[in-house]
Each structure stands twice: as C-alpha cells, then as structure tokens.
Amino acid sequence: MILTYLLTYLLVGGLYSEDVGGPVVSIDAQQSLDDAITSLRSNHIHRLVVIDALTGNPLYLLSYQPILRFLRQCVSTHTHLLTL
C-alpha cells in the first residue's frame, strides 16, 4: 500500500520528482519485455514504473534483476533451443 502511494505520488504532476532527481520513466503493462529493456537502456535508468493503461495506477517497479532472473529461468528450462 505504501509503495503504491509513493509511486502514485511520483507519477502525479508531469512525471517528475525531486526525490529521484529527474523524470520518472514508466511503461504500459501491455508493452513487451523488449520495450521495457529498450526503455531502461535508452533512458540510462535502473528502474522502470509499470503502469496499468486502463487506470493509470502503478503496478510494479521493474529493474534489471527480475528480468535477468526470468531470462536465466527461460534458458535453463529450454536449453534444447540453444543447441545448434
């Protein structure tokens, strides 16, 4: 609840917060993982706010660590796809 309140506070008013030192970058929950990674890299940021397109509410604070965990799990589960 507190995280949702904090993220909502950061997103109000032009997506800017002095606490984080610049614009708060967000992505729609319906966008792809590739879009999220591209946004993280192109904005030189480590965290990305995932928002619900219908309500505008923040859903999740995405960082590189869960992305890497997900990719590692995919690779370990589907090693047969990596063989030539």
Image (cartoon, grey):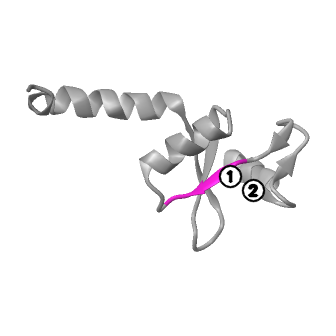
Q: Residues within 10 Å of mark 1 (few under 14, many from 20)?
A: some
Quadrant hosting residue 83: top left
Front-most of residues 80 and 5: 80
Main secondary structure of the magenta stretch: strand
The residue identified by callout 2 is 8
Q: Which residues are magenta?
A: 25-29
Q: How far is mark 2 from mark 1, CA to CA?
A: 6 Å
- What percent of the width, then of the height, locates residue 57? 65, 63
Front-most of residues 82 and 47: 82
Q: Is residue 15 above or below residue 52?
A: above
Asked which secondary structure carries label 1, the reply is helix
Q: Is residue 13 left or right of residue 25?
A: right
- What percent of the width, then of the height, locates residue 4? 68, 52
Asked if the residue under mark 1 is in contact with the one under mark 2, i.e. CB atoms within 8 Å, the reply is yes
Front-most of residues 5 and 54: 54
Q: Residue at x 15, y 28 (%)?
A: 82
Q: Is residue 75 above or below residue 58?
A: above
The residue identified by callout 1 is 4
Q: Amino acid at mark 2?
A: Thr
Q: Residue at x 84, y 41 (%)?
A: 22
Q: Amino acid at mark 1?
A: Thr
